[in-house]
Image: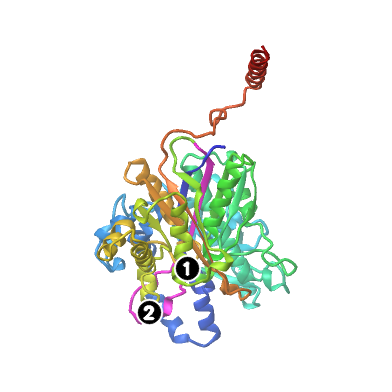
């Protein structure tokens, strides 16, 4: 059995301040509940694309800088955007990009197969040249289809469509897919098409890193969205929908749902499929969550700071058999939060961290970096949620003291050495452990990192059908270069059937000779 490796990763952001206003739950609830004062001020606190592009945590997410480089930048980071210019503050990185909203609208129409995304004629003319120049959009073989502005306005006025705006103007809409099914309402279709589009963008950037999408056998999608109609809410399948538009023509696929923990679950399942030799290559992908745009917007306005939750996140990973180079996903060193474990913070960390390491006789300090819930603290602290990654690292350190892995006075050193600043958008599944996989691979290639523990945690009680917590973790390890195939054929090679027959025949002759000698 060959070990599974993660041999490719991509991370994308779409800057979507207008979708934030149209679809973010904080904003929709403000309209419903008459909090017009917040909505009237909102425009003054939304960033333009250049501010979003140069924002240091965004660059850390897409791979423009390493997370540890954030420690060298003065906080608050949102006031230091001028520090990241040139290659460090670029729109594109080796692992992905930050896409402006007008191009994302075009991408939404490109992935729409039911003519639900309508774009006005003037906007289509303006966007055509950008599509021709974009490394992803130009290869999708589509031209924007224009609609009359009067038709768009009528659909919105009748409540049958969600508006799409750009630079203060109405430029399109997303229509409802069914007049009476709220699971196919315009609002839900906006969420689902945006998730699909950001997932396709991530898959395309995975291919830009050198991966042949035709070589993907199976796709697992693990966002927090769910598509279906009134007869099967959440029936899916985002995975196959993304595979189709990304160009994975030889792939099948399905969705995995587990709130924030879903990406870690999906990667473990992908590794199992590869190690079991069911598929040669499995892709794990997720798009962003429209509902969580501007989720903490009111708290940000109270602090007189920009609304930082203005991007849809996306990521994609390729999992394949051991190539002797890529980071190994150790399926034998995993942590899992079981039903009977309890949901106290100590119980969760014990299940996900120390249980996993104990199986391999590793101490807490044997792991170089822990990737936990990597939310950007500049987003969460104003809302009263604190610095989430730092809280997790302190909890791990405290557990280390209790176990005897650390002395009490070493706790903060452990946090500094084995943790990192939070840098990911607060979109549930997006920050949960997996944002560090790309940087970890880069550091392992340079010999700067040996092991990282990827930790996904989820709040199942949000669905109101259980009070259970959830979590799963796995060790990501630098590849030794020695392909372990348990004595089988060389990884990637084919079984020589004639050679196997000769070995069996020789073994039978040896057994016969031993029996003859014993009888004499």
Q: Is residue 83 something one can see in this rendering?
A: yes
| Eye-nearest disc, 2 or 1 | 1
Q: Is-magenta flag for residue 406?
A: no
Q: How many marks?
A: 2
Q: Is residue 145 above or below residue 234?
A: above
Give residue 104's position: percent from left, percent from top.
50, 59
Q: In what quadrant of the picture does the C terminus appear?
A: top right
Q: Give the mark nearest the N terminus, 2 or 1.
A: 2
Disc assigned to residue 301:
2
Q: Is-magenta flag for residue 313?
A: yes
348, 105: nearer the viewer: 348
**Magenta stretch?**
293-322
Q: Is residue 253 above or below residue 354?
A: above
Query: In percent of the image, x 53 and y 73: which residue is there?
Result: 22
Q: CA distance from mark 2 to mark 1?
A: 36 Å
Query: In percent of the image, x 37 and y 44: which residue is there?
Result: 444
| Crowd rating for badge 2 (residues with CA inside 10 Å; few <14, some 14–19, many 20+) | some
Disc assigned to residue 236:
none
Residue closest to the far right? 231
262, 328: nearer the viewer: 328
Q: Which residue is mark 1?
A: 347
| Crowd rating for badge 1 (residues with CA inside 10 Å; few <14, some 14–19, many 20+) | few
Which element is circle 2 on?
helix
């Amino acid at each position: 059995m060959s070990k599974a490796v993660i041999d490719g990763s991509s991370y994308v952001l779409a800057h979507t301040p207008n979708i934030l206003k149209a679809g973010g739950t904080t904003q929709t609830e403000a309209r419903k509940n008459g909090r017009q004062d917040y909505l009237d001020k909102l425009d003054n606190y939304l960033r333009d694309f250049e501010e979003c592009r140069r924002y240091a945590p965004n660059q850390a997410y897409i791979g423009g800088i390493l997370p540890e480089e954030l420690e060298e930048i003065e906080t608050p980071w949102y006031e230091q955007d001028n520090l990241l210019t040139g290659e460090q503050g670029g729109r594109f990185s080796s692992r992905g990009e930050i896409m402006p909203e007008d191009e994302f609208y075009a991408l939404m129409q490109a992935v729409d197969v039911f003519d639900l995304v309508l774009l006005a004629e003037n906007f289509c003319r303006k966007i055509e040249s950008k599509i021709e120049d974009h490394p992803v959009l130009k290869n999708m073989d589509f031209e924007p289809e224009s609609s009359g502005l009067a038709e768009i306005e009528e659909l919105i006025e009748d409540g049958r469509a969600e508006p799409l705006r750009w630079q203060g103007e109405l430029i399109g809409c997303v229509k409802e897919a069914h007049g009476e099914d709220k699971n196919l309402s315009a609002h839900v279709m906006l969420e689902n098409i945006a998730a699909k589009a950001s997932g396709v963008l991530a898959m395309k950037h995975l291919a830009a890193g050198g991966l042949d999408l035709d070589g993907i056998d199976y796709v697992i999608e693990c966002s927090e969205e769910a598509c279906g109609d009134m007869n099967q809410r959440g029936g899916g399948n985002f995975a196959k929908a993304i595979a189709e538009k990304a160009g994975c023509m030889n792939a099948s696929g399905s969705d995995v749902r587990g709130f924030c923990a879903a990406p870690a679950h999906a990667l473990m399942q992908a590794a199992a499929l590869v190690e079991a030799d069911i598929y040669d290559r499995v892709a794990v992908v997720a798009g962003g969550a429209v509902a969580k745009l501007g989720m903490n917007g009111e708290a940000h306005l109270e602090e007189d700071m920009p609304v930082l939750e203005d991007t849809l996140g996306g990521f994609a990973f390729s999992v394949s058999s051991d190539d002797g180079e890529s980071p190994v996903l150790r399926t034998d060193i995993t942590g899992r939060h079981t039903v009977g474990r309890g949901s106290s913070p100590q119980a969760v960390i014990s299940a996900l961290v120390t249980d996993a390491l104990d199986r391999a006789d590793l101490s807490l300090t044997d792991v170089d970096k822990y990737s936990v819930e990597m939310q950007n603290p500049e987003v969460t602290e104003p809302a009263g949620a604190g610095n989430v990654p730092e809280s997790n690292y302190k909890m791990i350190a405290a557990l280390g003291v209790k176990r005897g892995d650390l002395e009490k006075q070493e706790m903060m050193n452990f946090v500094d050495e084995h943790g990192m600043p939070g840098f990911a958008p607060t979109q549930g599944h997006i920050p949960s452990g997996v944002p560090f996989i790309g940087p970890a691979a880069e550091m392992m290639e340079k010999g700067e990192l040996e092991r990282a523990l990827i930790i996904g945690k989820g709040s199942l009680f949000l669905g109101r059908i259980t009070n259970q917590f959830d979590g799963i973790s796995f060790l990501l390890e630098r590849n030794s270069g020695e392909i372990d195939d348990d004595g089988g054929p060389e990884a990637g090679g084919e079984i020589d059937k004639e050679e196997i027959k000769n070995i069996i025949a020789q073994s039978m002759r040896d057994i016969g000779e031993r029996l003859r000698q014993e009888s004499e």
